[in-house]
């Protein structure tokens, strides 16, 4: 007989990742023969560029298949320093760089190295599902600041100041945002920075994973670049997953103060150790290699964004604004709440909306409840135009069928 396993308080504080749950569910239904269109997965449908794959294959042939330093190869750290200089005008040296198996462990390593029980982490909502979960796993207390459509889904200086307490340890910024695609202008970041300069106990974790995915000539900037006065307490996090279509390769990285990077190195040396050596050589090729595929891919993403926003605004009860970047939109479904689906189920929440949409029309989206701002849902338009076209018809049919 199996003995009873008592779980940790930490794991009991969190739920499984909703983005991963929806993606997994859609894949399962598809495997079972259902005609499901998955708009849940937050990953580019493009392939990893050939020169990056070639570098990885070469690394295998060259026998570069052994351990590397736990927080990344020196050559990769050099490439990351060059990237920060080139794209963000930020000067980091290799001892200020942390490389981990994806963006998630970078954030987790920073939190586990710095959070004590009760320390507060300010998280603008809607947020990517894993920020509060990782803070809570590390004993932190997420403090949510609601940033709705009236604020263009962005944190305002007033709302930031109201959320800061003597217990605030971190502010999490994410621009362009998962799940809304909203991105901060230089002036907006400066206004936030002006508040932060008055609260030296607050550190800033900026998740810049979608940096290269911006449209309509939007000028991307990150907070340590906008306000050098915050450089010493900012962890600038990024990765190769989204821009280079390398989600499965698992390489995330960050630049920050050497004192913080040093303790994050201690954590990774005792937990995962280095990300795959092969993936690290691929990431070097990605960062140092040609970037001409980016504008081509962004043109496709922009076209899809415009199409999806226009179609969603044609659906009864939905309204959707046009975000600056990423490959997500976050339509409100307020007009569908209180209506009844064909199954007889009353749509009381956006989780009900997403569940009924999947059941009735076989379209998988992620419910707004998971991202902390309801009623809404997230669509990832990083999928073929053909699938998106079909999905938009189905969503419109679903909305029309509600009584
Ligand atoms: N960042 C992606 C998403 O939000 C990948 C899944 C995850 O790690 O959450 O869908």
Image: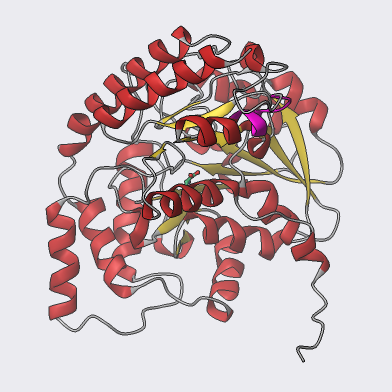
- Answer yes or no: is residue 178 visible: no
- Relative height, residue 13 to residue 220 (above, below): below
- The residue that appears at 46% across and 30% down in the rendered structure is 361
User: Residue 383: horizontal and vertical position, in percent?
Assistant: 31, 36
* Residue 338, above or below 387: above
- Figure check: 218 above or below 274: above
Q: Residue at x 31, y 23 (%)?
A: 389
**For this view, does 244 lie left or right of residue 140?**
left
Residue 378 seen in the current view: yes
Residue 107 image point, x, y percent: 58, 55
- Front residue of 253 and 303: 303
Q: What is the number of callouts on the image?
A: 0
Picture quarter with the C terminus: top right
Magenta stretch in the rendered image: 347-353
Image check: 38 left or right of 151? left
Look at 22% across and 51% down and name the residue there: 48
């Amino acid at each position: 007989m199996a003995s009873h396993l008592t779980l940790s308080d930490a794991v009991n504080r969190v739920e499984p990742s909703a983005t991963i749950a929806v993606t997994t569910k859609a894949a399962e239904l598809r495997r079972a023969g259902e005609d499901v269109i998955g708009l849940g997965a937050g990953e580019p449908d493009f392939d990893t560029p050939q020169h990056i794959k070639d570098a990885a294959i070469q690394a295998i042939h060259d026998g570069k298949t052994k351990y590397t330093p736990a927080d990344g190869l020196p050559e990769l750290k050099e490439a990351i320093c060059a990237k920060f200089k080139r794209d963000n005008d930020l000067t980091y040296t290799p001892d200020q760089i942390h490389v981990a198996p994806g963006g998630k462990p970078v954030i987790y390593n920073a939190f586990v190295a710095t959070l004590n029980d009760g320390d507060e982490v300010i998280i603008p909502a809607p947020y990517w599902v894993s920020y509060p979960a990782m803070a809570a796993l590390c004993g932190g207390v997420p403090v949510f600041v609601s940033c709705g459509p009236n604020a263009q889904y962005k944190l305002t200086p007033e709302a930031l100041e109201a959320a800061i307490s003597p217990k605030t340890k971190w502010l999490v910024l994410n621009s362009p945002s998962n799940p809304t695609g909203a991105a901060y202008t230089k002036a907006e970041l400066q206004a936030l920075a002006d508040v932060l300069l008055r609260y030296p106990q607050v550190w800033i974790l900026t998740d810049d994973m979608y940096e290269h995915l911006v449209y309509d000539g939007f000028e991307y900037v990150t907070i340590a670049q906008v306000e050098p006065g915050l450089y010493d307490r900012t962890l600038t996090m990024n990765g190769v997953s989204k821009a280079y279509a390398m989600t499965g390769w698992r390489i995330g990285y960050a630049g920050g103060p050497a004192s913080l990077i040093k303790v994050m190195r201690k954590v990774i040396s005792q937990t995962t150790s280095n990300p795959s050596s092969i993936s690290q050589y691929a990431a070097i090729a990605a960062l140092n290699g040609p970037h001409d595929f980016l504008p081509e891919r962004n043109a496709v993403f922009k076209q899809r964004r415009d199409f999806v926003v226009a179609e969603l605004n044609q659906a009864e009860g939905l309204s959707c604004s046009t975000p600056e970047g990423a490959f997500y939109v976050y339509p409100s479904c307020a007009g569908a709440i209180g209506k009844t689906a064909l199954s007889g189920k009353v749509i009381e929440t956006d989780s009900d909306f997403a569940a009924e949409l999947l059941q009735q029309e076989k379209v998988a989206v992620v419910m707004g409840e998971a991202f902390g701002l309801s009623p809404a849902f997230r669509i990832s338009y990083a999928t073929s135009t053909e699938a998106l076209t079909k999905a938009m018809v189905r969503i419109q049919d679903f909305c029309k069928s509600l009584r």
